């Protein structure tokens, strides 16, 4: 599985994994804003954007292994790995399966707990609806929760851009990813085992992965850093890119200034 990838900048490699049901297009402001500080690598996870889905059973572990192969292809031994929402789940799977390849971890608007049964059932319902009826269920049910009220009220162009990305998500990839996320394990043990710096970022208005979930993840690591982005919902990197980029730049400058063995 070869992932389609957009990259920018040079230096310290930072892999950013996109949210569901978007693509690496969501990281445009990060590729532009962080290129002076690091080498930003933003792949399309399997089935989304320019990456094909393949025939494998749904699995976040598989998505994490795709990212490891991407690092191999790029000649990168270790990288800072991070993701937003679904990208955060893949990041935690990557930490579990490839801990020796991680220089630092960024978890944005995501959660370490497994889905409770009602959430798993809802993912399956949406998977089936998308396969039978197309993307309308994503627009009516998923899209509204992705964006915070401040963005909806004041930044119509941002909302429109996100809506376009949601509508372009391939139904097969949407269903596959929903089933992969539904089966994910609890990852708090994975985080507590980290030997590298951790940055947790969350939108102040995020209702899907609220600040309380972010605080719980940050507490698992002795020096875990927590950044709450004002006036942002679940897609904090898209809604308030300047604040998001500042948080990452500061994390790279301070927490990763001294390379660990």
Image (tube, helix red, strand yellow):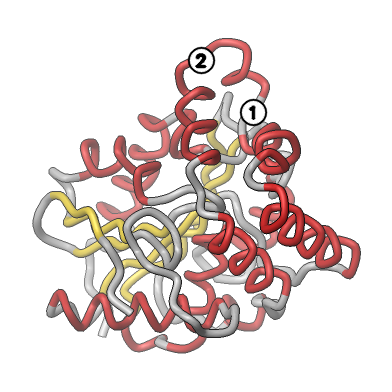
Please tell me whether residue 99 is drawn above or below residue 127 in the rendered image. Answer: below
Dots 1 and 2: beta carbons under 8 Å? no
Q: Is residue 92 left or right of residue 183?
A: left
- State the residue lying farthest toward the right: 118
Q: Which mark is residue 155?
A: 2
Q: Residues within 10 Å of mark 2 (few under 14, many from 20)?
A: few
> Residue 58 or 149: which is nearer the viewer?
58
Give the quarter of the image for residue 141.
Answer: top right
Residue at image x 59%, y 37%? 203
Assign a secondary structure to mark 1. Answer: loop
Could you classify mark 1 by the number of other residues whose Cα lies within 10 Å: few (under 14), some (14-19), or many (20 or more)? many
Question: In this rendering, does residue 95 appear at all?
Answer: no
Determine the CA span between mark 1 and mark 2: 10 Å
Where does residue 158 sit, x and y in percent of width and height? 47, 23
117 to the left or right of 201: right
Residue at the spot 35% in from the left edge and 64% down from the top edge:
51
User: Mark 2 or mark 1, which is nearer the start of the sequence?
Assistant: 1
Seen in the picture, residue 11 relative to 230 is either above or below; the reply is below
Relative height, residue 103 to residue 142 (above, below): below
Pinpoint residue 160: horizontal percent, then vertical percent: 50, 23
Q: Residue at x 12, y 50 (%)?
A: 9
Helix, strand or loop at disc 2? Answer: loop
| Residue found farthest to the top | 154
Q: Report the residue marked by disc 1.
A: 148
The single residue placed furthest to the front in the displayed view is: 132
Give me the residue at 52% from left, 14% from top. 156
């Amino acid at each position: 599985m070869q992932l389609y990838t957009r990259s920018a900048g040079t230096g310290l490699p930072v892999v950013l994994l996109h949210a569901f049901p978007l693509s690496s297009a969501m990281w445009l402001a990060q590729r532009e804003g962080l290129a002076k500080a690091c080498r930003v690598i933003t792949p399309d996870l399997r089935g989304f954007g320019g990456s094909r889905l393949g025939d494998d059973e749904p699995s976040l572990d598989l998505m994490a292994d795709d990212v490891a192969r991407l690092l191999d292809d790029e000649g990168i031994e270790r990288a800072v790995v991070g993701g937003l929402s679904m990208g955060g789940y893949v990041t935690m799977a990557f930490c579990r399966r490839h801990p020796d390849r991680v220089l630092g971890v960024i978890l944005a608007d995501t959660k370490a707990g497994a889905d409770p049964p009602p959430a798993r059932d809802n993912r399956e319902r949406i998977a089936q609806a998308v396969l039978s009826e197309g993307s309308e269920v994503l627009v009516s049910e998923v899209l509204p929760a992705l964006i915070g009220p401040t963005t909806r009220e004041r930044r119509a162009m941002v909302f429109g851009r996100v809506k376009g990305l949601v509508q372009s998500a391939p139904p097969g990839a949407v269903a596959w990813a929903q089933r992969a996320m539904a089966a994910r394990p609890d990852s708090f043990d994975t985080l507590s085992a980290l030997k590298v710096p951790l940055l947790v970022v969350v939108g102040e208005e995020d209702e899907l992965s609220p600040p309380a979930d972010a605080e719980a993840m940050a507490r698992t690591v002795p020096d875990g850093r927590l950044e709450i982005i004002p006036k942002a919902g679940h897609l904090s990197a898209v809604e308030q890119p300047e604040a998001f980029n500042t948080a990452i730049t500061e994390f790279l400058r301070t927490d990763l200034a001294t390379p660990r063995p």
